[in-house]
Image (cartoon, grey):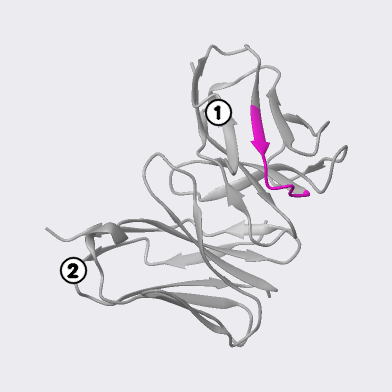
């Protein structure tokens, strides 16, 4: 599969903060997807992006499909404790390739 | 709608044993997939199917076989389990190959 570089690998959030994560690839994708996975469960689709430059929101989540088609970012606004989990980006040319994930935990 | 279900949820095998993981979806999706998830490596595609009776290899197919005899079911088989196959296995389905919906996973340990 294609190599996706997802960063940061991990982050700590404080309630109320805005946080961002991104995903880059050396190849062009036709679709970018963002998933969230909680412990012991399967990934759940958050946002799907189909067009270069597209900006899509789902509640407090906003994601963008980069204009080069080689990157995407996800922003979480006004973090709450239930935002913890692992966030995965995925790019699709004819199969999905996944990033290694960004682990979001609450700052003590 | 149950969505995507997987059985079993947990399994422990000895090296050399065989087993079959079952995935079922009730969304009438054409496409089905099997992934494995290992720490720090994201999800890697093992095999997939674009319709009943079809299967294809993914990124890491060695040591696994699959069958899609019915549209709603996708089976993953391990003929001779190895410790390197200790992982969490996820099944997913989709209508178009884009938005994939995942099951809850099967946690497999091979001793």
| Labels 1 and 2 touching (C-beta < 8 A) | no
On residue A11, the disc is none
Quickly name the residue at label 1: B84
Number of marks: 2
Q: Is residue B32 left or right of residue A57?
A: right
Which tag is nearer the camera, tag 1 or tag 2?
A: 2
Tell me which chain the residue with mark 2 is part of: A
Query: Residue B2 occupies which quadrant of the picture?
Result: top right
Label 2 sits on a secondary structure element that is: loop
**Label 1: how many residues lie within 10 Å, few (<14), some (14-19) or many (20+)?**
few
Q: Is residue B62 visible?
A: no
- Residue at mark 1 shares a chain with residue at mark 2: no
Q: Is any part of residue A9 visible from this angle?
A: yes
Region of the chain picked out in magenta, as a range:
B22-30
Task: Please give left or right for residue B65 compared with residue A22 in the image.
Answer: right
Which residue is nearer to you in this view: B19 or B51? B51
Instruction: Indicate left or right for B50 with A38 as reference.
Output: right
Chain of the residue where label 1 is placed in the rendered structure: B
Q: Looking at this view, is B23 or A108 the one in front?
A: B23
User: Would you say residue A5 sits in the magenta stretch?
Assistant: no
Residue B27 on the magenta span: yes
Task: State how far apart marks 1 and 2 are (Cα).
Answer: 39 Å
**In the rendered image, which quarter contains the N terminus of chain B?**
top right
Give the residue drawn at x 40%, y 39%: A40
- Spot the residue most to the front: B1
Point out residue A79 in the picture as x, y percentages from the top left corner: 26, 70
Secondary structure state at the residue bearing disc 1: helix
Q: Is residue A57 above or below residue B5?
A: below
Nearest the eye: B53 or B85:
B53
Q: Which residue is mark 2?
A: A15
């Amino acid at each position: 599969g294609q190599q996706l570089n997802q960063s940061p690998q991990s982050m700590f959030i404080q309630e109320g903060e805005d946080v961002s994560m991104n995903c880059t690839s050396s190849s062009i994708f036709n679709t970018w997807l963002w998933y969230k996975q909680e412990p012991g469960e399967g990934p759940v689709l958050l946002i799907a992006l189909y067009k270069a430059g597209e900006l899509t929101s789902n509640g407090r989540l906003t994601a963008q499909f980069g204009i080069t088609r080689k990157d995407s970012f996800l922003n979480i606004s006004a973090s709450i404790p239930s935002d913890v989990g692992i966030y995965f980006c995925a790019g699709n040319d004819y199969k999905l390739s996944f990033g290694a994930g960004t682990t979001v935990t609450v700052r003590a | 709608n149950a969505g995507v279900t997987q059985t079993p949820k947990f399994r422990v095998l000895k090296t050399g044993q065989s087993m079959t993981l079952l995935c079922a979806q009730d969304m009438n999706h054409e496409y089905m997939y099997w992934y494995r998830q290992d720490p720090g490596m994201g999800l890697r595609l093992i095999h997939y199917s674009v319709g009943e009776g079809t299967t294809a290899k993914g990124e890491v197919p060695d040591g696994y076989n699959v069958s899609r005899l019915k549209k709603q079911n996708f089976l993953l088989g391990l003929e001779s389990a190895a410790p390197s196959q200790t992982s969490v296995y996820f099944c997913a389905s989709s209508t178009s190959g884009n938005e994939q919906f995942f099951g809850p996973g099967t946690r497999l340990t091979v001793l």
